[in-house]
Amino acid sequence: MFIEVIGNSGSKNADSRLVCMKLGERVLIDAGSAAFVPEAELDQIDVVMLTHAHLDHILDLGFILDSMISRRNRPLVVMGSEACLCIVKKHYMNGLLWPDFTKINVNGKPILEYRIITDEVWKDLPGDVECMAVPVNHPAGARGFLFRSNGKTVVYSGDTGPTDKLWQKASEIDDLSAVVIEVSFPDSKRNIAIASDHLCPSLAADELSKLDRVEVPIFVFHMKPWFATEIVSELERIPNEFNLLQPGSRIEFC
Ligand SMILES: [Zn+2]
Ligand SMILES: [Zn+2]
């Protein structure tokens, strides 16, 4: 199993791509820049797992559905918390801002199917991978995820401020092989990170100390692109080995 980064950024400028990652060949985690997934690969995707309904994580969902509708003969399943899916339905694909694809059928079935994910239970996903959603400290129905495949587990923070349950769940796992964690702001903007339920390097170090696994590699994403240089210089303080996720980065975890 692998995670391949399509987009890594927590906001948008001319040089950045919003958050979207492939989890194996059949699942996307978030859809901020999903329109950058090549068409042939997109056609293999069965499920989009949404961490939450903020625009940087859902923006391209409507555009990939628009592109799929003339080629696809099965639904795209969009999974997330009840609150997250409610926001997407009510404020994005509502037949006003963008079409309601649950009302557009192919082969007698809607092209889009929403599915609420139950918290804190393991769920099978396509492609021999399991997922557990865990509520985190961020708006718009946010969840972090644990992904497990072939005896290896990755913890994926999604967007979050300081939180406990996710690290508690991750601590219970012996085969933890990677931590994917958001760091949105530099320490000089720690007050904004706290106010917006995000992390800066010092807050991320506090979160990782809750997990207390210095041997596990850390993968950082979701930087505001205009702060990237400042954030990277501050990340050196994190005790774990860390890697910056960029478009094209790949985490192999089995
Ligand atoms: Zn975000
Ligand atoms: Zn967010």
Image (cartoon, helix red, strand yellow):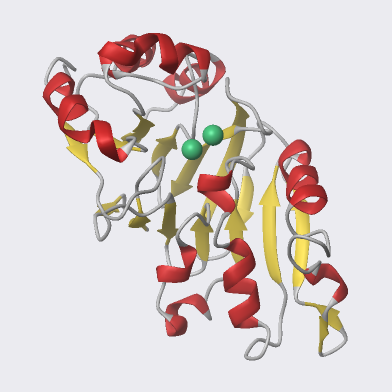
Determine the residue positioned at 16% across, 16% down.
239
27 left or right of 118 in image: left
29 left or right of 183 in image: right
Count of numbered labels shown in the rendering? 0
Expressed as whole percent of the image width and height from the top left, the position of residue 206 reads: 34, 9
Q: Quadrant of the N terminus?
A: bottom left
Q: Quadrant of residue 76?
A: bottom right
Closer to the camera, 238 or 31? 31
Instruction: Please determine whether, in this image, residue 90 is positioned above or below residue 200.
Output: below
Instruction: Please determine whether, in this image, residue 63 is positioned above or below residue 79.
Output: below
Expressed as whole percent of the image width and height from the top left, the position of residue 120 reads: 65, 31
Expressed as whole percent of the image width and height from the top left, the position of residue 189 reads: 33, 15
Closer to the camera, 51 or 252? 51
Determine the residue positioned at 83% across, 69% down.
102
168 left or right of 143 in image: left
Instruction: Please determine whether, in this image, residue 131 is positioned above or below residue 110.
Output: above
Q: Quadrant of residue 54?
A: top right
75 left or right of 166 in image: right
Determine the residue positioned at 52% across, 62% down.
27
Instruction: Please determine whether, in this image, residue 206 is positioned above or below residue 89.
Output: above
Determine the residue positioned at 77% across, 36% down.
83
Closer to the camera, 26 or 69? 69
Q: Is residue 210 visible?
A: yes
Q: Is residue 125 visible?
A: no
Expressed as whole percent of the image width and height from the top left, the position of residue 49 reads: 59, 52
